[in-house]
Amino acid sequence: MRMRFYGYPDAVEFFIFTMPPKKRKSKGRKLTKAQRAKQQHEEKERRLREQEEARLQAEKDEQDRLERERKEEELERLESKNLERREDELNELRHLLEDHHTAVSKWKTDAVEEAQWERYTNSGGIPDPAVQQDINTFISLWRDDPEVNIRPVLKQCNLALQLVEELEGLLRDVTTPQEGQRYQEGLVHLLELIHSKHLLTNEEILKRASANIDTETGNMQTVVKDDNITLCLWANLKKNPRFKGLTFEETGLSFNIPKQLAVSNVAVRILHTRYDHLSLLARMSLLRIDTPRHRSLAGGEEVPAGVDVPEQEETGGEVKEDNETQQHGRDEEVRDLDEEVQAIQRLDGSKSAASLQSIRNDAAESRESQIQTQMETLDAEDLTSPAVQPTTMDPSEHVQVVDLMQYTPLGGVFYYDAFHLPPQAHQANGWEIRQLLDKGLQLFPYPTERSNLEESEALACPPVGVSVTLPDSVVFLETPQVARWDAAGKQWRMDGITDSSYEEAECKISFSMESFHAFVLLQDTYANLPFQSWELRPLGQDSALFTINGALVDISITIQDNQCMLQSEREGGLAHLIGKWMSVPVLQSAMLNAGINIFVSEYTDKYVSTCGKDPLVEHAAYEQMALFAAACAFSRSKWNGNCGAEHLVMQVCEHLGPAPLPKDSWSLYMLGAPRSQKLAITENSEAFSSDHYPGSEFHSTFIHMLQDNMSPEGIATTRLSNYQFVDAVQSLLCAIRPLMYA
């Protein structure tokens, strides 16, 4: 190392030499000869082991390669064979389906013609709803009928309800907007007239309340029942400030009112209709007929509430003839639609006060005018009643509009109203003196308009209460919810319901509202979905049992020819359905009305989780399952959710007769658009695999795939299937869609 120092006159350099440190010798022990031999032996074994593993891996890779090549060759062979017979198999399936479709179409056409002939020969005075002149005549004659006694009127109402039901069916099958508009006009006029007739009979009972006083309470209370309605009326004659409410024991209905009403000249009505026309109006306000005026409202838009609709001239209540409708152009069609909207408004109370006053001024003193005045009064009451008048909503108020796709009203409608008690008759010198009013039955406004009250008085208007025992013809799978009718918006709403309580043991629900409203009990439409499992198995020739294990309740449907019979361990609410034969559409409607829904629609996937299947593949599967339902059993497979949207997987086995199915008899089949195949895996396998069952083949149709593993007797049984049985099975499968919702 060289170093130089500066700062002196002469720089001095020094050289320093350093020696590197000496390395210490390690003192490790030397391996013995035995140890070296052992180490060499282990190393040799390791090399041999690695060589063996490499050889085995190479052999395995070769075997895998050969297996892949074999499978590819096998698949190519099967695919080639499938393609060779594809056209023949598709043609055979097409002919089978066409034959069944032709037979079913002829059978249904003959049934319609037979029903029409039966109606023509044995009508008994019942009008044909498909003939507008018949409906017009019925409406005109009934409107002119002066009868106000409740029993004869209810009998006529039942006939009108039958016509309403038939018109609903016709509306579902309309082919032209003009036809749909004609049916809808007749339907709305009938609903309007039924409602007005109820009010007329209620007014007649209340006019004579003083002649039917209850000796214990000093008031009048009465109950009238028939197959379609239950009417509970209470007239406040004593005006006892300590009166709190009343229970109609025989109906399971009760109400509570505050002191303001207990001392008022008021009558309370609870009218339970086992039908639901308000939900029908709500749907009609959304699903418009496709006329020039409504084409711009496609997509569910609704005409805003409060929009003025031009009035039409009164024609003595006559409905336009069909030929008049056909002769007018676009402008007349729009005016016709305006008249339809006005008819709906007359029923739910959204008409303007000016138009109502105009009608009142034109009313005559005839019986026809009396009925018309009754309905106009209802309109006026609807407008002035806080229950239905259009109001400006507080932006902070939480409005809960009922989605009628998500919720289903069950058990009909409960009309909860308060009316001004009509003047009572009194006796004088052997004469009965009665004050006659030309306004009909008037709604009692409660609470009174806020603008007419001091703030302290407005706050002192307690809510009105009501209790309802659940109808015994309905099954509530969950605690029922309550919704009230909003006439201004033509919709059901859940807000405004307070103090709600449910007594499950007594099947009784109680709640309060700020004012009097019509209300319904709601249930989640898809409470029983998705399904846990399903099975369709034959019971014999043209007979099968379809079992659905739902989320909350299990259902079985026996199919015999074209008839179905419901079976369930849960009999409460279903006694009127269980064990009775009916067609598929009738059974579907009855189950929906009873609260047992296992049927789906195009909107169901918005509310229920699904397997997400291709609808075309799914529909093709249902068609072919129906063809073989007399000889094959089908069941849910857990692998259906693992095979992708373009494929379906189900368990299948041949089964003849009503004997129970052996548990080990099932095989798995996978269906797709290009081919169907039998799978090698079972329901108990650890993982899903699309490998085909060894020795099986591919087929272009499901039925040909099944035939490969069926006996000659089983195949012969399928060929003897009656077209009505096949149609019933297919209709149920398409309505329930178990491959999508299980």
Image (cartoon, rainbow, N blue to C red):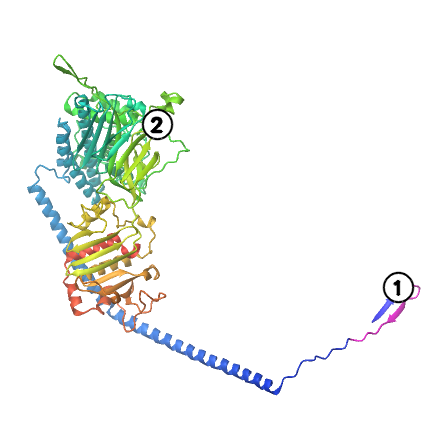
- Tell me if residue 102 can be seen: no
Residue 267 is tagged as: none
x and y percentages locating residue 424 in the rendered image = 19, 19
Seen in the picture, residue 400 relative to 638 is either above or below; the reply is above
Q: Where the N terminus falls, by quadrant?
A: bottom right
Counting other residues with Cα less than 10 Å from the Cα at mark 2, is it few (<14), some (14-19), or many (20 or more)? some
Viewer-side residue, 204 vs 111: 204
Res 191 quadrant in image: top left
- Tell me if residue 542 can be seen: yes
The residue furthest right is 9
Q: Mark 1 points at which residue?
A: 6
Magenta-highlighted residues: 8-20
x and y percentages locating residue 561 in the rendered image = 14, 56
Compute the Cα span from label 2 to label 1: 109 Å
Q: Does the segment drawn in magenta span residue 304?
A: no
Q: Name the residue under label 2.
A: 462
- Looking at the image, tell me whether mark 2 or mark 1 is earlier in sequence order: 1
